[in-house]
Image (spheres, rainbow, N blue to C red):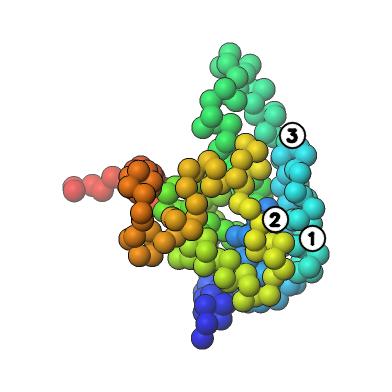
């Protein structure tokens, strides 16, 4: 079997063992990863068993891509704007802490991602579903995700595929180039992922798969990011009595 069929079989097995009769709930950003996962879910479970959730934070300049994807796949979907809760929480912090939490980059970038995940689990609770994680190996390797935000989920179809390999999956699935080749971005900073990271996914993916990288400074940066962010990939440490 090729990679697509292997992943499809894995998804079916997951739902057979962990969510028989449940819906798959997925956040639709319009990016490559969520597009590929959504297409895999449709192939594995049927479009009637997949629910897409679009979650703009106010205005989203590329929301049309997300809308186009759910229409292409023919899946049930909901558009939930998270600006209200994001703003309300910010104002509550400002009132109670006497500071603007948005002055802190970690808060400003991670909070919307965590509210989006709360939204997905809210939808999942209503429909009786399982939430799909859409992170890939490249992002996980350098910690380019939000703990308990987009890094969360009930099952993760792409966590063993680099960004380059995810694009290959998209092509195998027959997704239009609009979704497969879309430039990865966080939708908040106005910069692409690669601009923020300081290196290309092509360089990162080659290093992950072969250990080869020509630029020693970038190698050092990737190694440092990987080490610093390993905690995102590990189970929560828990105290054991008598040990």
Q: Judge the density around disc 1: few (<14), some (14-19), many (≥20) Cα neighbours within 10 Å.
A: some
Quick check: 118 left or right of 55?
Answer: left
Closer to the eye: label 3 or 2: 2
Residue at 75%, 62% (x, y): give it. Answer: 69
Q: Is 25 displayed left or right of 243 in the figure?
A: right
Q: CA distance from mark 3 to mark 1?
A: 24 Å
Q: Earlier in the sequence, mark 3 or mark 2?
A: 2
The dot on residue 68 is 1
Q: Nearer the viewer, mark 3 or mark 1?
A: 1
Between 128 and 227, the one nearer to me in the picture: 227
Q: Which residue is mark 2?
A: 30
> Which element is circle 3 on?
helix
**Residue placed under numbered mark 3 in the picture:** 84
Q: Secondary structure at mark 1?
A: helix
Mark 3 in CB contact with mark 1 (< 8 angstroms) = no
Q: Residue placed at 56% from the left, 81% from the top?
A: 5
Residue at 70% from the left image edge and 29% from the top image edge: 87
Q: CA distance from mark 3 to mark 2?
A: 21 Å
Q: Quadrant of residue 123?
A: bottom right
Question: In the rendering, at what x and y percent does residue 68 appear?
Answer: 79, 60
Q: Are marks 2 and 1 in contact (CB under 8 Å)?
A: yes
Q: How many labels were placed on the picture?
A: 3
How crowded pointer 2 is (Cα within 10 Å; few <14, some 14-19, many 20+) is rated as: many
Residue 86 visible (yes or no): yes
Residue sitting farthest toward the bottom: 1
Q: CA distance from mark 2 to mark 1?
A: 8 Å
Residue 23 lies, in percent from the top left, at 67, 66
Element type where label 2 sits in the image: loop
């Amino acid at each position: 079997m090729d990679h697509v069929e292997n992943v499809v079989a894995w998804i079916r097995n997951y739902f057979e063992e962990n969510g028989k009769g449940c819906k798959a709930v997925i956040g639709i950003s319009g990016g490559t990863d969520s597009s590929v996962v959504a297409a895999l879910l449709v192939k594995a479970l049927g479009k009637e068993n997949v629910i897409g959730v679009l979650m703009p934070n106010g205005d989203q300049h590329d929301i049309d891509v997300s809308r186009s994807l759910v229409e292409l796949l023919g899946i049930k979907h909901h558009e939930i704007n998270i600006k209200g809760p994001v703003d309300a929480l910010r104002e509550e912090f400002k009132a109670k802490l006497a500071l603007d939490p948005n002055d802190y980059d970690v808060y400003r970038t991670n909070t919307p991602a965590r509210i989006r995940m709360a939204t997905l689990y809210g939808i999942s609770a209503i429909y009786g579903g399982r939430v799909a994680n859409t992170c890939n190996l490249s992002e996980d390797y350098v910690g380019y995700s939000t703990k308990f935000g987009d890094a969360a989920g009930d099952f993760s179809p792409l966590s063993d595929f680099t960004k380059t390999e995810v694009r290959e999956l998209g092509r195998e699935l027959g997704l239009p180039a609009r979704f497969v080749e879309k430039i990865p971005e966080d939708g908040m900073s106005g910069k692409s992922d690669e601009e923020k990271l300081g290196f290309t996914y092509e360089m990162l993916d080659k290093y992950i798969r072969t250990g080869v990288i020509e630029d020693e400074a970038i190698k050092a940066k990737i190694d440092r990011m990987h080490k610093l962010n390993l905690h995102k990939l590990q189970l929560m440490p828990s105290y054991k009595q008598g040990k």
